[in-house]
Image (cartoon, grey):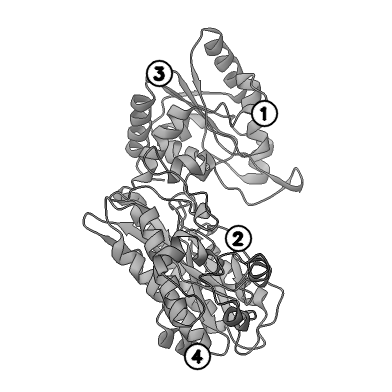
């Protein structure tokens, strides 16, 4: 945990922003795999971690914006708990460690909230994402579980987005730790990408690195020689000479701050000329994005400029044609780049998106674009100092999508389908770094994972 004064200051700031009422912050409980006592690895709710810092199941926090009091609800352990799990701090001691002076039992939580609700006190809560917390909030608020997301507190969401978007020095240090682990994961994957290796051997090895250096992976690992599938979690294939292996993986620090990187390596260490040409376009797009990032720029505008870099490179190879700006305006680039440039990152790898991605990535000034491709841009608003975002352009050749566009003559004025059909077995390339917005520009967090083509290939011979 951080120093208790950090959590006290965060809760005080949140009380001031919300203004009145009580704020319900449920922690997560254990989640059974197949029966109650066989649980998945515990992961605390990120908002609870941000405000209360306690990485322990079975806790619930209330922040009272009217009285200024915070209360931690939980039950002290029993002798049976001690026998199986050992001695743990009391709820009172846990509360004191994060600057909370009021504690009570879980049973008292329901009585207290009902009493406050009957007095007409406003109740703020976030959109719940776990079934058990939906049921708890349904009982506390008398709002049906199916309606909780639509009736969540907009004031609370906006206040927390404003607070959590800007990372302090302690948070940045934690993200750097996760980036250090991510570096080790990716370099190991690159070195292992040799013909005959199974994808699951590499995926398992790098996930072990994440566990040995912190809290494990920050999301399910994407590792595949079928990189045309953007979120490919299947690791069942044997690596073949000359194929491209994509690895999109990250780690969590012990305080659950995330990293998220993507690299592509040729199996066997040698890019073909065709692979190298596409790789260099994506690398140029990545470097261009980093050079454009600074406070005041919208990420939507940077995304579109990167799309122009990709379209220009593909035009030079004969895969696209016509006016580049017109092509991007019409969404022709999205045949090859069908996702957004990046997303916010922090305690969540997609930071705060449980609040509703529209609140995190957009605002009253910058609204989502409905056009295919750009519609998947998760973050488009203006950059501010100490935002942490990912930068992950890519080029993919998705046979089913190419076939559909060709049949429907979608953007046929800007795409040479005869040439594109020569790349149907190519796969995909994505290159991703984690970026901190600085006072005048940006910097890549952590040591940059090898990305230049010559150093990427050479890793397999070390």
Q: Position of residue 161 (x, y in %)?
A: 41, 39
Percent position (x, y) of residue 390? 42, 59
Pair 4/1: label in front: 4
Residue where numbered disc 1 is placed: 145
Spatial CA span between label 3 and label 1: 24 Å
Residue 220: numbered disc: 2
* Place of residue 249 in the rendered image (x, y in percent of width and height, measured from the top left): 53, 66
Farthest residue toward the right? Answer: 35
Of tags 4 and 3, which is closer to the observer? 4
- Residue 1 found in image quarter: top left
Q: Which mark is residue 20?
A: 3
Q: Residues within 10 Å of mark 2 (few under 14, many from 20)?
A: some
Of labels 4 and 1, earlier in sequence is 1
Secondary structure beneath dot 3 equals loop
Residue that sits furthest to the top in the current view? 119
Specify whether 270 is left or right of 198.
Answer: left
Residue 78 seen in the current view: no
Q: Earlier in the sequence, mark 3 or mark 1?
A: 3
Badge 3 crowding class, 10 Å Cα cut-off, few under 14, some 14 to 19, many 20 or more, is some
Looking at the image, which residue is at 61% across and 28% down?
A: 148
Measured Cα–Cα span from mark 4 to mark 1: 55 Å
Q: Which residue is mark 4?
A: 273
């Amino acid at each position: 945990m951080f120093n208790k004064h950090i959590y006290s200051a965060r809760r005080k700031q949140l009380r001031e922003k919300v203004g009145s009422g009580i704020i319900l912050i449920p922690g997560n409980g254990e989640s059974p795999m197949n029966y109650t006592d066989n649980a998945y690895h515990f992961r605390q709710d990120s908002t609870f971690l941000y405000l209360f810092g306690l990485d322990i199941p079975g806790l619930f926090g209330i922040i009272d914006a009217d009285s200024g009091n915070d209360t931690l609800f939980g039950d002290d352990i029993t002798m049976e708990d001690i026998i199986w799990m050992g001695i743990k701090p009391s709820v009172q001691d846990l509360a004191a460690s994060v600057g909370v002076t009021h504690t009570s039992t879980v049973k008292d939580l329901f009585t207290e909230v009902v009493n406050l609700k009957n007095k007409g006190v406003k109740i703020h809560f976030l959109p719940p994402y776990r079934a058990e917390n939906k049921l708890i909030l349904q009982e506390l608020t008398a709002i049906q579980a199916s309606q909780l997301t639509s009736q969540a507190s907009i004031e609370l969401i906006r206040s927390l987005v404003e607070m959590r978007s800007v990372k302090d020095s302690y948070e940045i240090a934690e993200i750097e730790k996760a980036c250090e682990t991510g570096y080790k994961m990716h370099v190991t994957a690159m070195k292992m990408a040799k013909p005959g290796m199974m994808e699951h051997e590499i995926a398992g090895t790098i996930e072990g690195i994440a566990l040995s250096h912190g809290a494990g992976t920050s999301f399910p690992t994407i590792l595949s020689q079928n990189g045309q599938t953007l979120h490919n979690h299947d690791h069942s294939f044997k690596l073949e000479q000359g194929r491209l292996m994509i690895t999109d993986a990250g780690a969590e620090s012990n305080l659950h701050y995330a990293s998220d990187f993507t690299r592509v390596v040729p199996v066997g260490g040698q890019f073909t000329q065709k692979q190298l040409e596409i790789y260099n376009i994506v690398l140029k797009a990545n470097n261009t994005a980093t050079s454009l990032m600074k406070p005041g720029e919208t990420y939507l505008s940077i995304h579109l400029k990167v799309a122009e870099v990709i379209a220009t490179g593909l035009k030079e190879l004969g895969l696209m044609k016509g006016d580049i700006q017109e092509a991007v305006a019409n969404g022709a680039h999205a045949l090859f780049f069908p996702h957004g440039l990046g997303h916010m990152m922090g305690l969540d790898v997609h930071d705060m998106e449980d609040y509703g991605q529209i609140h995190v990535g957009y605002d009253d000034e910058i609204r989502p674009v409905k056009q295919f491709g750009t519609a998947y841009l998760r973050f488009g608003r203006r950059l501010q100092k100490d935002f942490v975002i990912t930068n992950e352009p890519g080029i993919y050749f998705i046979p089913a999508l190419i076939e559909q566009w060709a049949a429907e003559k979608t953007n046929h004025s800007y795409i040479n389908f005869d040439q594109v059909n020569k790349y149907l077995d190519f796969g995909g390339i994505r290159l991703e770094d984690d970026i901190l917005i600085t006072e005048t520009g940006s910097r890549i967090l952590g040591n940059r994972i090898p990305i230049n083509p010559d150093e990427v290939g050479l890793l397999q011979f070390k």
